[in-house]
Image (cartoon, grey):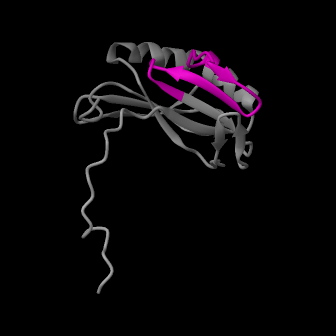
Amino acid sequence: MPEATPEATPHPAPPPLAGVLETSLYVADMARARGFYEAVLGLAPMFQDSRLCAYPVGGRSALLLFLRGSTTATVHLPGGTIPPHDGAGPLHCALAVAAADLPGWEARLAAHGVAVEGRTHWPRGSISVYFRDPDGHLLELATPGLWPIY
């Protein structure tokens, strides 16, 4: 009898996902990264230790900065374990902003000497502004209309 393929095996629909809770970026120098995210983006940490700084964003998600290489071993906590993870190279993260706030954000970036590398007007009416953090990660400020869900 032939082996069943995944396409041939019926599966129930998955339970719904409620959103993306965390986005992680990996940084070479935590103090430098924190200086950027706190001074330029105005974020305030909700948790920090020697390997991680977690920022609340928009009241529903968290931006996690991990010291590169500090999470390559399993972390043992009183409630369980966190498997190893890490990242290298420039990653991308988009942050949602109101259209009316975009000029203020661009002025703030300029005031902090942060170069805007790109600006895109999307077909659905959104505007994206792209810039980099000190580790070379590409950050995007995106106004509503970028995606059908935003």
Please provide percent x and percent y for residue 94: 44, 33
Between 7 and 25, the one lying in front of the other is 7
- Whether residue 3 can be seen here: yes
In the rendered view, tell whether residue 52 sits above or below residue 89. Answer: above
Q: In which quarter of the image is residue 119?
A: top left
Please provide percent x and percent y for residue 39: 63, 16
User: Farthest residue toward the bottom?
Assistant: 1
Quarter the N terminus occupies? bottom left
The residue that appears at 74% across and 27% down in the rendered structure is 49
Q: Tell me: 10 left or right of 64.
A: left
Between 126 and 4, the one lying in front of the other is 4
Q: Tell me: 52 left or right of 104.
A: right
Between 147 and 63, the one lying in front of the other is 63
Quarter the C terminus occupies? top left
* Range of residues picked out in magenta: 38-62
Q: Does the magenta stretch include residue 59?
A: yes
- Whether residue 113 can be seen here: no
Please provide percent x and percent y for residue 23: 52, 35
The residue that appears at 40% across and 18% down in the rendered structure is 102
Q: In which quarter of the image is residue 11?
A: bottom left
The residue that appears at 74% across and 42% down in the rendered structure is 70
Q: State how many labels appear.
A: 0
The residue that appears at 77% across and 30% down in the rendered structure is 50
Q: Tell me: 16 left or right of 108.
A: left
Q: Tell me: 102 left or right of 64.
A: left
Q: Does the magenta stretch include residue 43?
A: yes
Please provide percent x and percent y for residue 127: 33, 28
